[in-house]
Amino acid sequence: MWLARCSAMLFIWALWLAAAPGVRAAGEFETEAADTVVATVNGEEISARLFHRRLIGKSSSAYSYFRERYGVSDSADFWTTRHDGVTPLEWLKKHTLDECVRIVIEQTLARQKGVIADISYSAFLQSLDRENERRRKALAAGEPIYGPQQYREDDYFDYVFTNMVIELKRRLGADELNASEETLRQWYELRKHELYSRDDSVVAQVIAIPYGRRDDLSREAARARIEEAELKIKGGALFEEVANEYSENQSGLERKFDEESGHADDRQRSLMRAMAMKLAPGEISPVFEEAMTFYLLKCIERESLGYRPFEEMVQGVRHDYVNEKYEEHIANLLTKASIEINRPVYDAIQPR
C-alpha cells in the first residue's frame, strides 16, 4: 500500500512538471510516468501516462454528454457534481478505462500474433523518440519526409496503433478468421441488405433559383422566391408548372440520380443527391441550399436496383467479414478480461 501511494505521488509530481509553464522535466520523469501502472488487464499493465493522455482526449466528450443530458456547463465544481449518482469525473474515468482496456487487449493479441514485440508504453515512447530523431536528421540532410516534421505523442500513438490493428486483422484473416467461399456467400446473404444494396435510381423534377452571380438575385431575394414557389405548391399548384414559372431555365428540369451519376453528384451536388435519395415517388423535398442556389425537388420515379453481386464484391465481403468477426472476438476477450485497478494512482489522475 505504501509503495502504491508513493507511486501515485510520483505520478502527480510528474504531471505537474509536464503542465507547469516554463518547466521541462528531465528525461527520467517521462520514463517513470510511463512505467507507473494505473491498472492491469489479465496481468498486462496500463500505463498511467497512456490513461491520462486518453482521458484528456476524451474530456470534451464528458462536457458534451453532461451538457446535453443534464444542461450543465463547465464550472469550478463541474467534475465533482453528481447527476443521477455519477460525477463527470467518474464517467470520464470509466470510459477512459474501457478504452485503455481494449487497447491493451488488442496489443496483447497483436503480440501473440507476432505483430509487435513490446507493448509497454515506455517502449512506445522510445519508438516515438527514434522516429522523430530520424525525421530531424532527414530534414537536416534535405531528404523528403512524409507526414509531420515531428510527431506529437498522441498522434504517433494513434498512427502506430491503427497500423498494428490493420496488420493484426490481416494475419487473423489468413488464420483464425479465414473463411471459405461458401461461408462468405452465406454471410453475404445475411448482410447484403445493409452493406451491399445498390443505390436506387431516382428521377426528380427540380426548381433551382441561384443567387450572387452576375445579374442574379441576392441571397435574400432568391430565398424569398423559392419560398413563394413552395407556398404555391403547398396550395395545390402542380410542381412542373411552378418549376416552369420559377426555375432559371423555365423548363421544370428533371435530374436522374443513380450509381452512374454518383461520382459527379458527390463532387458537384452532394446535398441535392442526398435529398433526392430520401424521397418517395410524389414526395417533395423541403427547401435547401447548395452552391449558391436554393432548390426544391419532387421525386417522380424511383427504382430499386437490387444488390451488388457477390462475385464483384468478394474481396470487400472478405474484408467486412473479417472486421465483424474481429469485433466479435475482441468483445469476447473483453467480457473475460480480469481487470485490477491501482486505486491510489487511478484516484489521483485528474482531467486538468
Image (cartoon, rainbow, N blue to C red):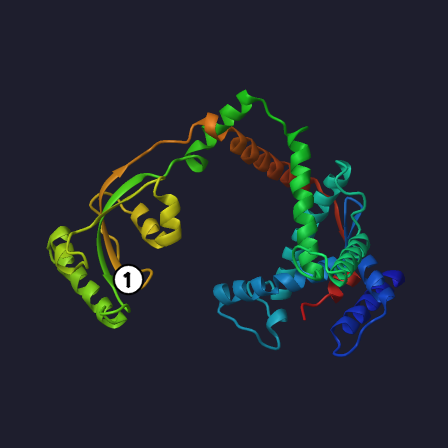
Residue 82 on image: x %, y %: 59, 67
Relative vertical location of residue 263 with respect to residue 191 in this rendering, above or below: below
How many marks on residues? 1
Which of these two is toward me, 119 or 274? 274
* Residue 287 can be seen, yes or no: no
Q: Residue furthest top?
A: 182
> Residue 84: x and y, percent?
55, 63
Say what amino acid the circle numbered 1 marks.
Thr
Residue picked out by circle 1: 293
252 is higher (above) or lower (below) than 77: above
Point out the image quarter for the C terminus.
Answer: bottom right
Q: Quadrant of residue 219?
A: bottom left
Q: Residues within 10 Å of mark 1 (few under 14, many from 20)?
A: some
127 vs 73, left or right, is right
Residue beneath the point at 75% across and 77% down:
20
Q: Is any part of residue 72 visible from this angle?
A: yes
| Image location (x, y in percent) of residue 62 | 58, 63
In the displayed structure, 12 sits above or below 237; it is below
277, above or below 81, in the image: above
Residue at horizontal 84 percent and vertical 67 percent from the top: 10
Task: Tell which of 249 and 47 is nearer to you.
Answer: 249
Left or right of 300? Residue 167 is right
Residue at the farthest front position:
142
Image location of residue 143, percent across then percent down:
72, 57
**Quarter of the image that includes the N terminus:** bottom right
Residue for point 80% across, 56% down: 130
